[in-house]
């Protein structure tokens, strides 16, 4: 595989000197792009796109054709794993992901199949390989997975949830079977991420999207310990390069100290926590990624520019170092934003960041 | 009105000595109680209950007949205010509250009526008066309102939301009209809460349920400043007693320092933040309320007892003071819990708390 031309994201995560702040955006490929909507119209539902390596690759590259992004991210979904287990993933309009067969009992858990990720999730690995090849060394490719806890919540609830009733019931009534499920998921996620790395992923992001709904005392037991286990079992790249891992969570202000000691290279923050405080708290241990409110993209050009500049100022002034920071939103690009606003955001980061005396 | 027989909640909030830890529970009246479900079956929908002072009073007293609670809370809803404005509040099964006429533009905001709370929300004030009389001095009555920001999100979104798209659009596109809406709501909430106090409410809780979805920099501007304004304009009780105000928010770990300086007597925490850390951070300024995970009520008796004891231990050991703490859940009582578990929870707090050498 080709050597990387643009390694600024890798360098920032590893706290090596950079010339400007690297940018990628969660959900940088997706519904806000007209070319994505056109492809969906032609080819069917979201899962069909994910399961066709050529289409998945095409979609992953769409934002890179438009914008000056510093990474591509695999086009897929965190729920491919439970889908491969036969839980019957489907998407209801406006409802988010749903499973036909939620997992609620010890018997349900015992009946879950052993996955062979190379067979059962071969379409993801093929999409990784193809996307990496098509990138041709221009920017790195980010692979990803949901965390065991986050996947478990979807599997147990049968979809998204407001109160996580069934998951919490299991946690307080039968913690041992929840642990069994989490360990089972952990082992599969290790295989899945290592297979992504083997097939070309150069950076990994773990989405612990729902870690923040756990109590402070439950979080290390039911989420973090499994994430740590995954981190410790990830391999280096096929070129024997280190593969930085970004751990993303939402509403995780109270968890940052623990997250920073997970083994992650970088911590992805949502928009609710000030990055300068995050730097003071955990910036010595990890790189930081984030964390502008995605809704800033609804604002005027002036608002977007102001918010970007403020965020860069907050990070670089607090840190006093000229690396260790990856620009991103605090969550995914919203469906209804204008792509021109996304371009402005990305270009502003690149233009403004050089003024913070990065080298 | 009768003098209070049980003033332990008031004393705890004001950091006066107490003999045991007072307990009340958010949504202590409601669907988990069979007598509530029976009444709903007979009398119709949730709003009809709220709007009939006798029924509202009966429902508010139901949990006090079963359990040894240290306060009653007005049976009502935070959305009575926008309902009185003519937004057309209704409840869809499983969907939560909805408004027929959401507020999205400057014209919408300018067309909002001036409310006279004594007329337009007389049913709430009558329910306050009747409930206070029926309590007959046994325990204090808690009145409440949503915060301006939280009410605004429901009015703008037209109901609950996952992404708060329209509210955030307004915040970043037209902050001045959002401020106009927030100031309008602030003035009405002041009238509403003062009218509740005049009619007998002895403690006030402000639900800033969605304060935690604002960025760290937006929170003081779009939520906290209006809450502070409300706090500064609340009167003393008809008996000239101080009326403690509890400020409750969710996912607010990053906001605690600011919340503590809001003028609130107590801060209500959700279950994600450790109470001992909250005490170290803000316990000198305010009393603390919370914060067990409501899902603990799904656990065995042993789990419930363990979690209660741990929480009491965490507060009293950290604080070294023997008051300033109100036991509550981190959010409302879930719909599906067994009332016997609620009884065990309440009794355990009372029994265990005396062992922490409270006097």
Image: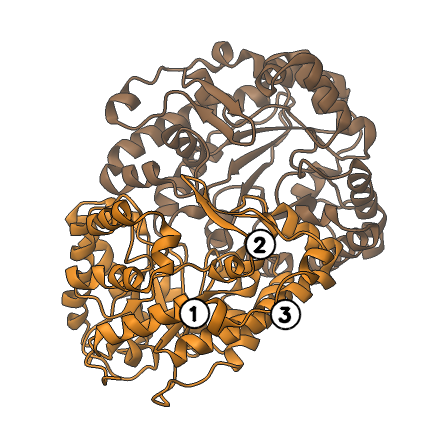
Chain colours: A orange, B brown
Q: How dense is the environment of label 3, judged by Cα within 10 Å: few (below 14), some, or many (20 and up)?
A: some
| Residue A104 screen position, x and y as percent | 67, 51
Q: Secondary structure at mark 3?
A: helix
Estimate the spatial distance between the alpha carbons at disc 1 and disc 3, rounded to whole Å: 22 Å
Above/below status of A318 relative to B43: below
Mark closest to the chain's N terminus, 1 or 3: 1
**Left or right position of A154 against A273:** right
**Left or right position of A229 against B224:** right
Q: Nearer the viewer, mark 2 or mark 1?
A: 1
| Residue A354 screen position, x and y as percent | 16, 72
Estimate the spatial distance between the alpha carbons at disc 2 and disc 1, rounded to whole Å: 21 Å
Residue to which mark 2 is pinned: A155
Estimate the spatial distance between the alpha carbons at disc 3 and disc 2, rounded to whole Å: 14 Å
In the rendered image, which quarter is residue B328 located in? top right
Label 3: chain letter = A
Q: Secondary structure at mark 1?
A: helix
Quadrant holding the N terminus of chain B: top right
Q: How dense is the environment of label 2, judged by Cα within 10 Å: few (below 14), some, or many (20 and up)?
A: many
**Left or right position of B170 against B191:** left
Q: How dense is the environment of label 1, judged by Cα within 10 Å: few (below 14), some, or many (20 and up)?
A: some
| Residue A183, numbered label | 3
| Residue B238 screen position, x and y as percent | 62, 20
Q: Give the residue at x 45% y 50%.
A: B258
Q: Nearer the viewer, mark 1 or mark 3?
A: 1
Residue to which mark 1 is pinned: A122
The reply to whether residue B359 is in sight is no
Mark closest to the chain's N terminus, 2 or 1: 1
Q: Nearer the viewer, residue A287 or A85?
A: A85
In the rendered image, which quarter is residue B303 located in? bottom right
């Amino acid at each position: 595989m080709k050597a990387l031309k643009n390694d600024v994201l890798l360098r920032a995560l590893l706290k090596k000197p950079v010339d400007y702040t690297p940018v990628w955006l969660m959900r940088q490929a997706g519904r806000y792009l007209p070319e994505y909507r056109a492809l969906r119209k032609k080819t069917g539902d979201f899962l069909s796109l994910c399961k066709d390596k050529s289409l998945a690759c095409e979609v992953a590259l769409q934002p890179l054709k438009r914008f000056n992004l510093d990474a591509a991210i695999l086009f897929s979904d965190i729920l491919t794993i439970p889908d491969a287990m036969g839980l019957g993933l489907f998407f209801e309009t406006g409802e988010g992901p749903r499973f036909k067969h939620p997992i609620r009992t010890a018997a349900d858990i015992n009946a879950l199949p052993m996955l062979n990720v190379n067979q059962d999730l071969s379409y993801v690995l093929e999409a990784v390989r193809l996307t990496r090849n098509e990138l041709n060394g221009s920017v790195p490719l980010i692979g990803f997975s949901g965390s065991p806890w986050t996947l478990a919540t979807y599997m147990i609830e049968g979809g998204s949830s407001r109160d996580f009733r069934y998951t919490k019931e299991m946690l307080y009534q039968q913690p041992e079977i929840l642990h069994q499920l989490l360990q089972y998921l952990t082992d599969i996620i290790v295989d899945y991420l290592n297979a992504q790395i083997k097939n070309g992923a150069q950076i990994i992001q773990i989405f612990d999207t729902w870690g923040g709904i756990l109590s402070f005392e439950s979080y290390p037991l039911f989420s973090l310990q499994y994430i740590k286990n995954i981190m410790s079992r990830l391999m280096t790249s096929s070129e024997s390069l280190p593969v930085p891992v970004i751990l993303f969570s939402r509403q995780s202000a109270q968890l940052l100290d623990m997250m920073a000691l997970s083994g992650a290279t970088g911590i992805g923050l949502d928009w609710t926590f000030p990055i300068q405080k995050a730097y003071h708290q955990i910036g010595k241990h990890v790189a930081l990624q984030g964390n502008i409110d995605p809704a800033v993209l609804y604002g005027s050009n002036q608002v977007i520019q102001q918010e970007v500049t403020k965020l860069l100022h907050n990070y670089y002034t607090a840190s006093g170092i000229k690396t260790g920071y990856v620009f991103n939103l605090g969550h995914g690009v919203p469906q209804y934003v204008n792509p021109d606003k996304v371009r402005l955001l990305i270009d502003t980061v690149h233009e403004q960041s050089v003024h913070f005396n990065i080298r």
